[in-house]
Image: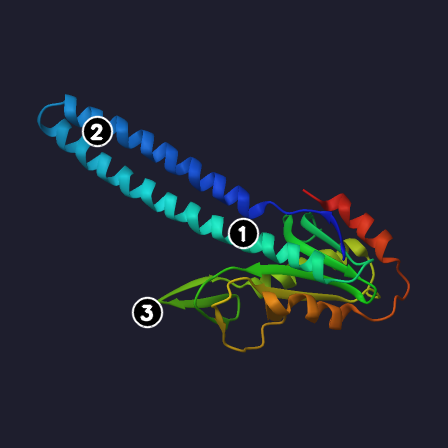
């Protein structure tokens, strides 16, 4: 079993923000209803319209909170699977924030440190068919198509930021996107990162990072990276 050095809580933060926005919208809706009931004529109409709009907003935020909650559970399963399925003396660190000289702070969901190098892990919890197009991915689900920022591009940006703070080219670093939704379909396209499903993530990392230790000590490297935990 690998060692978990720091955990991640980013998806949980999104859940709390969405729930808070839903509560605020709900409170605003109640106030608008009160205005509509107590006011005559035009003010009543304005209050009713505002109440309807705030109700729609509250429902949308509740749907967001539910989606983020599902993503949080999936990310927790991924972190647990990495820790449980990777060998002893490997190290998993979640939720790092790195400040490279060439960009604003870069959020890193997790890294895995093994004897053969480091992997930058970027989860993707989108449901549906995923097709990469450069710095965006198209997500098709139930006949609807939308775009999301490319998780592979995010992983590659995190890789470059990590490489800068490590200050050496001698430690191999690989970007890995893990699809946490079991029903998602990925159309194989070159993205600059390895893209794997959650059930195969640990095995893929063992294959990539299982080489012999070179000039670094995995424990010392992992301990150094804990300083970037948010």
Query: Any mark on residue 143, and which?
Result: 3
**Residue 152 pos. (x, y %):** 59, 65
Q: Nearer the observer, disc 2 or disc 1?
A: 1
The residue carrying mark 1 is 73
197 in relation to 88, above or below: below
**Residue 227 pos. (x, y %):** 77, 44
Say which element carries label 1: helix
Horizontal side, residue 40 vs residue 87: left or right: left
The residue carrying mark 2 is 33
Q: CA distance from mark 1 to mark 3?
A: 26 Å
Please tell me which residue is depicted at 54% across the width and 42% down the height of the picture. Answer: 13
Please tell me which residue is depicted at 71% across the width and 44% down the height of the picture. Answer: 229
Q: How is the rendered protein coloured?
A: rainbow
Neighbour tally class for label 2: few under 14, some 14-19, many 20 plus, Cα within 10 Å: many
Q: Quadrant of residue 43?
A: top left
89 in relation to 47, above or below: below
Query: Any mark on residue 158, and which?
Result: none
Is the C terminus in the top left, top right, bottom left or bottom right quadrant? top right
Horizontal side, residue 200 vs residue 137: left or right: right
Which of disc 2 and disc 3 is earlier in sequence? 2
């Amino acid at each position: 079993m690998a060692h978990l050095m720091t955990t991640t809580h980013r998806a949980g933060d999104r859940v709390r923000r969405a729930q808070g926005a839903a509560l605020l919208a709900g409170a605003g809706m109640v106030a608008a209803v009160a205005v509509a009931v107590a006011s005559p004529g035009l003010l009543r109409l304005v209050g009713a319209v505002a109440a309807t709009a705030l109700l729609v907003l509250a429902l949308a935020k509740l749907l967001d909170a539910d989606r983020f909650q599902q993503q949080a559970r999936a990310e927790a399963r991924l972190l647990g699977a990495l820790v449980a399925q990777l060998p002893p003396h490997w190290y998993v660190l979640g939720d790092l924030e790195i400040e490279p000289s060439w960009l604003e702070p870069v959020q890193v969901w997790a890294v895995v440190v093994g004897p053969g190098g480091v992997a930058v892990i970027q989860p993707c919890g989108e449901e549906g068919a995923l097709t990469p197009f450069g710095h965006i991915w198209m997500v098709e689900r139930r006949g609807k198509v939308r775009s999301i920022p490319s998780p592979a591009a995010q992983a590659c940006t995190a890789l470059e930021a990590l490489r800068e703070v490590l200050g050496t080219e001698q430690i191999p670093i690989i970007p890995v996107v893990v699809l946490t939704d079991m029903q998602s379909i990925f159309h194989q396209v070159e993205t600059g990162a390895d893209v794997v499903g959650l059930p195969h993530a640990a095995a893929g990392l063992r294959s990539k990072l299982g080489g012999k230790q070179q000039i670094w000590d995995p424990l010392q490297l992992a301990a150094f990276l804990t300083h970037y935990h948010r």
